[in-house]
Amino acid sequence: MARSVRQSKILELISTREIETQDELVECLRAANFDITQATISRDIKELGLIKILSAETGKYKYSLVDSGEQAVSNKYISIFKEAVISIKTAQNLVVLKTIRAMANSICGLIDKLNLDSVLGAVAGDDTVMVILPTNEQAQKVATTIEALIHF
Amino acid sequence: MARSVRQSKILELISTREIETQDELVECLRAANFDITQATISRDIKELGLIKILSAETGKYKYSLVDSGEQAVSNKYISIFKEAVISIKTAQNLVVLKTIRAMANSICGLIDKLNLDSVLGAVAGDDTVMVILPTNEQAQKVATTIEALIHF
DNA sequence: AAATCGCGTGAATAAATATGCAAAAATCGC
DNA sequence: GCGATTTTTGCATATTTATTCACGCGATTT
């Protein structure tokens, strides 16, 4: 379990900040109470298919998801999704996800990345994610989509 | 001049073969009569914005253009284009580019990458590229597009 | 319970990549 | 052409990243 929690945290970190090196990532993870070494990060990065790319603004290298809105996102990260999400329910025009503790933010980030139709936004607590949609029907539909995603 | 010729050769090489390391690239370039070191390649790669990505088939890392058909291609490689292309003419349904020696193949590759509308294909000799279009009018149009590209 | 397997990990290190600096080469203005 | 200035490069090395090897831990089998 720790494995995918950590990897999901990595995804969250690199989409949030500009991470230039694996050592930097190690520090951030240590700060978030993951006790690991650079060796492990190197393997995680390979596994997640992350790339090091030249940041347009800073001119420095930084880690990034592989470009494009294609399948890359889905394919690779669904497994993390699967392990972290405990339940999916709707409440009016909201979809509420229960996750294992501390994973909500990462999952929230992934949902943003998925760029699902009609999703207005998503917010996260510690173990809860709320996805906001315009109507009750659309919430129902998105819930089904996410369900399907998780169960293959 | 050598600079952009070399960089264009790099682009050609990485789209042709699976280049795993900069040293490998150095060898290939040496074989093609470019006498350079890894340090220079490192800088070229940064300048071209190339990335190292996990090859789906082999599971090994390889160098690649940054994904996507967006502007990345145009923005970055136009300057090489500019230096290499001497003249642009049409002949019936063909666009004929004259390039400095040994650059035709690289330019041909770039044209493929640009993915211009209605281009059926492009072939290259040593200093000549032929772009093939369905009609004379379309050839005329593509020639203009390329002209524009080169002169900003 | 002991033995075996499989997987994830860290420590140490090998391999790969980036960079500071000085020198060489190209470019410019005269 | 000639000196001044800018750009490009190699060398040496620092930095960063990947990998080997050994170990630990949980699950499974005997």
Image (cartoon, coloured by chain):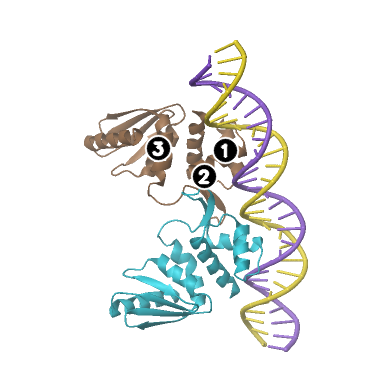
Chain colours: A brown, B cyan, C yellow, D purple
Q: State the residue position of label 1.
A: A28
* Sequence-first disc among 3 and 1: 1
Instruction: Return the disc, 2 or 3, that comes first in the chain's sequence.
Output: 2
Instruction: Residue A78: give its label.
Output: 3
Answer left or right for D18 relative to A6: right
- Please tell me which of labels 1 and 2 falls first in the chain: 2
**Residue drawn at (30%, 76%) of the image:** B138
Where residue B37 appears, x then y in whole percent? 66, 63
Residue for point 23% across, 34% down: A136
Q: Element under label 3?
A: helix
Specify whether disc 3 shares its chain with disc 1: yes
Number of numbered discs overlaid on the protein picture: 3
Snapshot quadrant of residue A109:
top left
Name the spot of residue A107 as percent of width and height, x first.
41, 35
Q: Chain of mark 3?
A: A
Q: Relative to residue A62, is residue A90 depicted above or below?
A: above
Separation of disc 3 and disc 1 at Cα?
23 Å
The span from disc 1 to disc 2 (Cα, nearest Å) is 10 Å
Q: Amino acid at mark 1?
A: Cys
Q: Amino acid at mark 2?
A: Arg
Query: Is residue A54 something one can see in this rendering?
Result: no
Q: Residues within 10 Å of mark 3 (few under 14, many from 20)?
A: some
Task: Assign a secondary structure to mark 1.
Answer: helix
Camera-near label (3 vs 1) is 3
Q: Looking at the image, which is closer to me, B71 or B4?
A: B4
Quadrant of image for the N terminus of chain B: bottom right
- Mark 1 falls within which chain? A
- How many residues crowd mark 2 within 10 Å: few (<14), some (14–19), many (20+)? few
Furthest-left residue in view? A137
